Amino acid sequence: MTTPPSDDTVRRCLAALTDLLGPAGIVTDAEAQAPYLAEARGNAVSTPLAVLRPSTTEEVAAVVRLTAEAGIALVPQGGNTGLVGGALAGRGTVLLNLGRLNRIREVDALDHTMTVEAGVILATVQQAAHDVDLMFPLSLGAEGSCTIGGNLSTNAGGILTLRYGNARAQVLGLEVVLPDGRVWNGLRRLRKDNTGYDLKHLFLGAEGTLGVITAATLSLVPRPRQMETALVAVPDVTAALRLLKRLRQASGDAVSAFEIMPRFAIEGAARYLGEHNDPLSEPSPWYVLIELTAGTPGDALRDTVESALGEAMEAGEVTDATLAASGDQRQKLWRLREGLPEIGRKVGGALHHDVAVPVSRTPQFIERANAAVAALCPGARPYPFGHLGDGNIHYNIARPDTDDPADRDAFLAQGGAIMRAVHDVVLDLEGSISAEHGIGNKKREELARARSSLEIDMMARLKRLLDPRDLMNPGKILPQ
Amino acid sequence: MTTPPSDDTVRRCLAALTDLLGPAGIVTDAEAQAPYLAEARGNAVSTPLAVLRPSTTEEVAAVVRLTAEAGIALVPQGGNTGLVGGALAGRGTVLLNLGRLNRIREVDALDHTMTVEAGVILATVQQAAHDVDLMFPLSLGAEGSCTIGGNLSTNAGGILTLRYGNARAQVLGLEVVLPDGRVWNGLRRLRKDNTGYDLKHLFLGAEGTLGVITAATLSLVPRPRQMETALVAVPDVTAALRLLKRLRQASGDAVSAFEIMPRFAIEGAARYLGEHNDPLSEPSPWYVLIELTAGTPGDALRDTVESALGEAMEAGEVTDATLAASGDQRQKLWRLREGLPEIGRKVGGALHHDVAVPVSRTPQFIERANAAVAALCPGARPYPFGHLGDGNIHYNIARPDTDDPADRDAFLAQGGAIMRAVHDVVLDLEGSISAEHGIGNKKREELARARSSLEIDMMARLKRLLDPRDLMNPGKILPQ
C-alpha cells in the first residue's frame, strides 16, 4: 500500500479537477450527489472526496492523470445499478460517474455494428439498434437505467444469454483509459482479427479495476420477426431441463429466454405486491417462462411451440401451459418474473445468491441447497428462480413466515452461515458463486474459496501489472 | 535475453526428458521427425534439439519444468497445419507436439459441452458432437489434420465464423500448463461465471507464447436439420454484400457460410487442377458459395432461399444461381472453393494475404488493393476470395501469366513490397493484417505497423509477466 496523499495534495487535486471539468462535471450539492452514492439495494453508501462527471474520453483521461499524480484512487460508475458494491466509493477516493459520456458515435447497419460511449443507457442502445431494423441482444431488469459501460465492465448477463451469450460476447472493440492515463483506442469493428493478444478481454468483466471503459464497438444481430411467449407449469426442475432440450431441438435453437420460477412467484405477488396474477387454472410447484424468437416472418414459430408443448405434455414434462396471444398478455406473463426481485424487497428480510452450476446439475443444486438452508434455519423459505437455460439460479431466501421479529433477526443473523452453505453446494457442483453480478466488494472474501490459489495469484499479478499503485477501484474483486 | 544453456545442461535435460517420456514420447528418427518439422506450405523447416510427444497433461507439465530449469525454450505444436510459422522450432529449442493428448474426456449432451484434450483432431471433435446429435461449429480446410489445441491457440476462424463466431467463442474453459510448469485447471463448463478476470482469453489466440493449452471444455449447439447450398453469380462485391444482408434478413440469420470467389476459381481449376467444373452457363466476374442451415426439420429453408434469390435477381444483385439438389452436388460446389488454396500451390508463384476489413469496406479494399498490385507488378493476377461475411479476404495473387521465368522472379522479388502495399490499404481501412492465421514468425515485423505502440507495449508486458524468461514459443507474435 502507498501512503495516502496529504490534505494539501488532495485540495490541490480537487481544485485542478474543478478547473478541468467545470460546474457540470463535478457534483458538490449533497442532494444532487445522492443518486450516485447510495447502492441499488440501499445497503451501503459511498463517501468519496468528490463525484466527477466528465463528458468526454479526454476529460476522463485527464481525471485519471490528475488523480494518479496525487495518488488518489478512482471508482468508475455507470448507472449505479450493481448489486455487489462494485461502484461503491470509499473514503479518500473519487467517484467517476460515466453518465455524461452518452453519445452514440456511429451506427453501421451493413456492418451490423454500433459504437457507443460508456454512459449510454442500455435501453437506448437497444432502441438505436431497433431504429435500423437490428437488435442489440442484451436485456436485463435494470436496462432502463444501467449503462453499457457498466454492462461491459461487469460482463452483464440477463435473459438473452442462453441464445446470444453474455455482454462480453457482443463486443468487437473497446476504448479504455488505462490507469496511467493513456487512452487505448481499440475500437475495431472487425469480425476476425488475430494480430496478437486480444486485449479487450482484460477489461470486460474487470469491474473497473484495470482501467475505465469509455466506449465500445458492439455487434448487432438481425431483429426477430416472430416472438412467442409461454408460461408453462412443470412438475420439477428436471422436467424443465428436458423441456428446454426438446424446445431447442424442435425450434432450431430459437429459445431466447427460459426462466424458471417456483410457485412463490405467484403467491408472493398476491401477498406482497397485491397482484393477483395466476394465468393457469391449477397451482404447480414450478413454472417456466419461455420466449422463442425467429428471424423469419410468418407464424410458423407458433405451430412449432404448440406442437412441442403438446409432445412435452404427453411426455409428462409439462402439466399446463398458456401462450401469450397479445403484447398485453406477454407483459402480464413477464410481470410474474419481473416481480420476483421486488417481492424480495417487500418480504422484509431476504437473502440473495447469484450462482451458476452446469445446466444439468441445477436440479441437484436446488435440492441440496434447500436441504442446507432447512438445516440452518428451518422456517426459511427459499425461492430459487432465474436463467435455468444458463444454469444461473438466483437462489433467494425469504425469512421465516412468522410475526415474531426475533425469528427474522435469527434468520438474518444466520446470513453469513447460510451464504457459505449455499456456496459450498455450488462449489461442490463445480459452479460459480457469482454468475452475472460480479464480485465487487461484497463477494470478495468468498473469492478465495471459489477460485484456486493459482487463479487468485494470476489475477493479482494482472492487477499489479496494469495498476501497480492500486488506484483503480481498489478493494474490489481481489481478496485483501 | 538470457544466456543459452551449456551443451552439458542441454545433454542432461534431454536425458531427463527421455527418461520421463519413454521411446513413444520422444521422436529421434529423422524420417519420423519429418512431419513435425516441415511447415504446411513447405517454406521453412524446424531445427529443434528434440521432438517431444508427451501423452498426458502431467507429462507436459514435467517437460515444461525440466526445460525451464535448463533454460531451454519450448515450441508447442498441434497438427502442424499453421501458415505463419507459429509452430516452427528454431535451433536450441524443443518442439512439443501435443498430438498424443488425444482423449475426449467427457461429452455431456444435456449441458451441450465436451471436454477434449489439445491433440484431438478437429474432425474428431466434430464427429463426437455429431454422435450425440449436436454440432461443434468450427470448420476449416485443415479440419482432418489440425488439432483443437492449435485451433484454440490460434483462435482459428474458417467458414462458420459468420454464424457461430471464431474458435474463442466456442470455449467455456481451459486447462493450461503455465511457463513455470504449474497446471491451471480452468475446465469450467459454466455458461455464466463472473468471478473475477476471465483468464482463458489470455491463452486463446496467444499462439502458445504464454503457456501450453492441454485441454478445453467446448460449447456445442443443436445440429442443423436442413441445409441449403447455393452457387450464385454476382456482378460485383457490393452486390454480394447486399445479397448477404437480404439472405440474413429473409432466413432469420440462417446463413452459415458466405464465401466469395472470383472467376479465377473456375478457370484456375480447369487450367491448374484439370478440373472442369462450371456449374453455371454464363461466366461471371464473381461468385458466392452460400450455405444456410436451420435447426428445424422440414423443407421451409429451401423455399426461403429460392424466394430470396429470386428477389435478389430482380434487384440485380444476382445474375444466375444454382442450388445443390444432392450431397454430391453440394460437394461439387464446395470443391470450387476448396480448390483455391491448391491452385495457389500449382500456379508456381503466388503471394498470400489473410486480411480483414469491416464487412462494408470489402469492395473498397479489393479495388484499392488490386490497383496497388497493378502499379507494382502490372501482370500479376490477384484472386481475392474467402469469408466475405466476416470481412475476411484471402487476398492472394498469382504470378504474371507468362512463360518467361524472369517475370516470375521479378514478381516474387516484389513480394515484400506487394505485401506492404496490400497491408497499407488494409490498415487505412482500419482492418487486420491477420484475420485468422495469426502472426507466428512470418508477420511479426508487420505487427508494429498493425497495432499501436500502446498495444505492442501492453502485449509485451503481458508476455513478460507470464513468461519472463521468454521460453514459450520465443520469436513469435511480438516484434524483436
Image: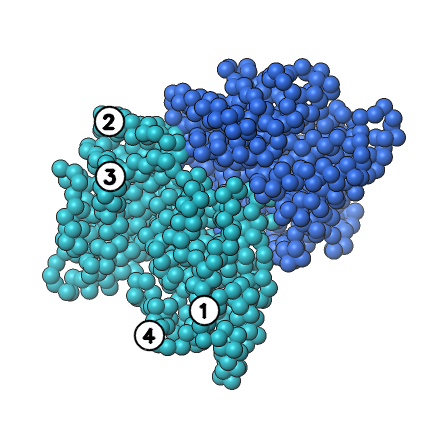
Chain colours: A cyan, B blue
Label 4 lies in what chain? A
Disc 1 target residue: A53
Tell me, yes or no, whether the two marked residues, 3 and 1, touch with CB atoms within 8 Å.
no
Of circles 4 and 3, the one toward us is 3
Disc 4 target residue: A31
Position above or below: A478 against B475: below
Q: What amino acid is found at the position of numbered circle 3 in the picture? A: Ser
Disc 3 target residue: A326
**Residue A402: mark in rendering:** none
User: Tag 3's secondary structure?
Assistant: loop
Q: Earlier in the sequence, mark 3 or mark 1?
A: 1
Label 2 lies in what chain? A
Position above or below: A334 against B161: below
Tell me, yes or no, whether the two marked residues, 4 and 1, touch with CB atoms within 8 Å.
no
Residues at marks 3 and 1 on the same chain = yes
Residues at marks 1 and 2 on the same chain = yes
